[in-house]
Image (spheres, helix red, strand yellow):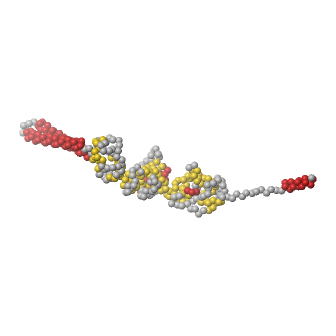
Amino acid sequence: MKNIFLGVLILYTLSACSEKKPIVQTVTAPSLPVININSTSALTISEYPASIQGAVNVEIRPQISGNLEKVFVDEGVFVNKGQALFKINDLPFRAQLNSAIASLHAAESASINAQLEVDKLSPLVQNKVVSEYQLKTAQANYKTALANIAQAKAMVSTAEINLGYTLIKAPVSGFIGRLPKKQGSLVSSADVEALTQLSDVHEVHVYFSLGESDFIAFKSQYEGFSISDKIKNLPPVSLILPDSSVYSEKGRIDMIDGQFDKNTGAITLRATFPNAKGLLRSGNTGKVNLSVQHENALLIPQEATIEIQDKLFVFTVDKSNKVTKQPITIAGKSGTNYLVKEGIKDGNRIVFKGFENLQEGTIIAPENTDKEVAKN
């Protein structure tokens, strides 16, 4: 028993005196591609919601009251300037014209009689057969007769004008809008609703708005002392249609509003686009693509960013290769790149790919990449 106890004691002592070597786990830094950010020139494209109107939009309204006798056109058709559109019953206006003509003839007859009276009395006054008072009265009656002729002629002209208003013609060439009034309707110049609208769309005006900061940046890009000088140097603009397609023709900005809208804080610009094929109509909407040149801009690939709760972030890499999640503010897009307004500086490094599961403060092994930020 003593020998057994002694053996156990020796084994316990040897076990206690032996040193346990710690297990060391080596953590390898992740190897990720990194790109350098350098300032460069860039062309950004900004989109602005726009409304489209024809070069001329005319409300067709009756000048007189009456029954709509005929409608010569259909909704949506193209009409030429001077083409007949509507006919109002003209019988009452022909009667007015005939009455005015009859009044004119009566006035002319009265004038002849007054002239005869003056001619009759003139020699009698010279021979002192009648008094001069009678001659002056006859002369006054003659002048009154002449005035009545002028008044009757004016009534005839008015009646002719009103008769002409019974046939409504197109003041310009363009497309007819809806026709709320049908044949047989009673129409009047006091009607709230027009007979129709006529749009001349051989070219269209596209209206869009810029905020104050955008407008200041916009003005600073182009040469010229005045707004009119700058408009002459503006580049053509593109129109994006509601189906995201690009309208085939380029437009030019030809008007900048004289003041900002006090409610929206924006100023309205107008671009004019040719529309020979009639593809665009009044009331269309779209977006205007406006290009702006930036010097000393910081561009980063869109794929090098991550979006969290409507905010964009990049992972910057410091000198010790530690990464930091950095929020950025963008000023626009240039191709597949973002133009950075705030958040990073010239000379910074950012992680290009593989940052989906990257933690803040992680040390990485940067890989040089040949990725080059593309310029437009």
Left or right of 17 in this view: 99 = left
Residue 230 coordinates in the image, percent (x, y): 43, 55
Residue located 62% across and 56% down the image: 355
Residue 266 coordinates in the image, percent (x, y): 46, 48
Residue 230 in sight in this render: no
Q: Quadrant of residue 372?
A: bottom right
- In the image, 286 versus 238, the foreground residue is 286
Residue 363 in sight in this render: yes
Residue located 40% across and 49% down the image: 283
Left or right of 353 in this view: 118 = left
Q: Quadrant of residue 11?
A: bottom right
Left or right of 84 in this view: 325 = right
Q: Which residue lies furthest to the right in this view?
A: 2
- In the image, 366 versus 139, the foreground residue is 366
Q: Residue furthest front?
A: 1
- In the image, 128 versus 241, the foreground residue is 241
Up/down of 106 relative to 270, above or below: above
Left or right of 44 in this view: 32 = right
Residue 156 coordinates in the image, percent (x, y): 21, 44
Q: How many marks?
A: 0
